[in-house]
Image (cartoon, rainbow, N blue to C red):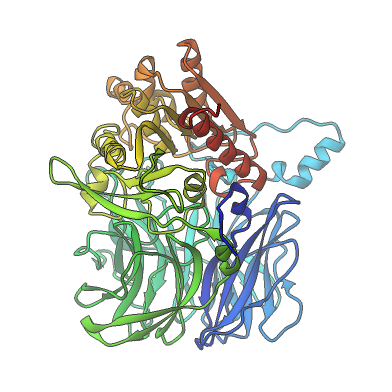
Amino acid sequence: MPKRPITIEDLAQIKGVGDPRISPDGARVLYTVKIGDVDKNKYYSHLWTIPTAGGNARQFTFGEVSDTSPRWSPEGGTIAFIRNKDRRTQIWLAALDGGEPRALTNLPEGAIGDLRWSPGGVKLAFTFRPAASGWTRDAAKQREENGKSKPPRVIARVTYRLDGAGFQDERQHVWVCDVASGAAKAITTGDFDNGSPAWSPTGDLIAFASARGADALRNRFRNDIYTVPARGGAARKVAAYDGSKSQLEWSPDGQWIACFGSESGEIGWRPKNTRLFIVAARGGASGRWRCLSAELDRSVGDHSMGDVREGGNTNPIWSPDGKQIFVTVSDSGNDHIYAADVASGTLTRLHGGAGSVSGLSADQAVRSFAILHSDPSHPGEVFAGALKGVGRKLQMAVRPLTHANREWLASVEVSKPREFWLTQADGTKVQGWVIPPPSFNPKKQYPAVVYVHGGPHGQYANTFFHEMQAHAARGYVVLMSNPRGSNGRDEEYGACIHRDWGNLDYADVMSVADYGAALPYVDADRMAIAGGSYGGFMTNWAVGHTRRFRCAITDRSICNWMSMVGTTDMAMPPEGLWPGSPVGDEIDLGWQLSPLRYVQNVRTPMLVIHSEGDLRCPIAQSEEWFTALKFLKQEAVFVRYPVETSHGMSRGGPIDLRFDRLQRIGDWLDKYLKPKRR
């Protein structure tokens, strides 16, 4: 049977495999599968299992629910997970040998995360942020029935909302739940947010991360590690480096806590690579700590982008003898698995190749692994990994386990991206990819679209991207790149655009456009530029500085630093990522770096897309940009998605609106880049 081109509607056909967790004995893997129901316009997520040796996958949970965060009990007989059912979220338990799952907790409305079993398997730690009492769904229903208005919100701190989560009226605390009774209580207190709970090996302490300094607002990238008795009590600060700390894990002997983070330095907001650290759990007032990934100068963890990536655990994993720590590392458009030698700080890459690892777990012996892996031609699937060799010769043999998207892939024609590297005048190398139309004719010329990713401190990667494949299938050559400012490279590569967006990064984007225009199968007169978030900023900046693009799509963009810095949920201080804060002393520089300053130069037809519920880049940014374009009598259309959608609408919004967005982008490209039929 001949394969067909990928369509917009295929977005709902791709099964999102995520969060693989290998059992303590290494015999099987538990994972999630997210599916789209177009008729009900909803996503559902269920738990599945598969033997590590290979075989048939088995669905473990069912129904119109969203089951996430599966966690094996230490003995492997019980599975804890977080279920959202009828818009209510609780912790549930299920026995591996069968029976109906049961709700463990009965918490009020709120957000649950960071689920962790105690070493003895009798308790669960997790984080919980309750919804404000006057703003729960029950309260809203009661007000509506009584004809009452919504109450006012009284705000006393500037970090009071978060994109995708909404208003943060209450603090997030660490809780502990008794598995036998379901009784749960908070073990942290105070007007602080607390996260990343980790049990000590003996189960008597829980470590967590929290920003509790006198100027916690200004020092949002400076938090600390604390320990608290598992039964509750006074929290004790663990002395460590000055900087960020997250994803905590105790060493098997209880002497060290591994974490991801970065040292603050003189400029706390200057972009930094995420490093692997170990901190003495009981180091005294002076503390002891070491960075184990300094020699690599890459970010640990997963920093890659895509629209069908579900992700999973990227926390550090200790070997049972405490001599090694296993981590994922983002490196030049890939995400690989490394082993860090604790004594020497030497890092060994365990496997290579073009691909992205976005989830990693290990069995109790830390010899067998479950891996979430994707590549440019395949959405994420579960792989099994097994260690072989020792020391510098340590390697990991990897093989696929699941094939959730096998039937869909067999029916569609996937265009394989081709990677390229450009060398700039100063010797800097810039990575990019070309995705041609599937089965394209190299003797023909095609229109092209240059895509700029968000962040900017993320990376396009060797992973499957439906949006790019859909555009290629419509007859476009898609160009993607990681300009300066991106992650996955040395720290200076990402930091060199600090408070200077639109300079070196713009030069890199235009070099990618030049590269594409020079390809024999690209029509240089039919090129567009598109991007979201930072990519939207760069799109706005580009059309104000060049007229080479036939049309542009700016999505959830930034145009004016003067209004942006005081309205984003990031609540940046004057010395933050960008200049221009109204309480700072760099107003002129902030305006100089704002695309709105150059809007009078724009002659490029623009599709402006934004979500009314976007708290990261508020919709006022697009309102300013669109209004200016219309006053200047330029061709522009403004598409506003409803307040229920957020900054991440294109990646996790309602199915029908994601379809609508892709259709509008495709139609805009067709209008300006494809010749009219006679």
Query: On screen, 349 above or below 98?
Result: above
Quadrant of the image occupied by residue 483: top left
Q: Is residue 494 left or right of residue 250?
A: left
Farthest residue, direction left? 426
Q: Is residue 540 left or right of residue 203?
A: left
Q: Quadrant of residue 151?
A: top right
Position of residue 381 measured from the top left corner of the image (x, y, whole percent): 51, 69
Which of 255/634 is in front? Answer: 634
Q: Is residue 146 visible?
A: yes
Q: Position of residue 98 (x, y in %)?
A: 72, 84
Picture residue at 30% right of the left edge, 55% below the top = 488
> Which picture quadrant has residue 302?
bottom left
Q: Nearer the viewer, residue 437 or 614?
A: 437
User: Does 16 sit above or below residue 118?
Assistant: above
Kindly tell me whether residue 582 is visible in this rendering.
Answer: no
Percent across and percent down for residue 323 are 29, 82
Q: Quadrant of the N terminus?
A: bottom right
**Who is closer to the viewer here, 130 or 44?**
44
Percent x, y of residue 138: 78, 47
Total numbered circles: 0
Above/below status of 138 relative to 357: above
Q: Is residue 604 above or below residue 294?
A: above
Q: Residue at x 46, y 85 (%)?
A: 364
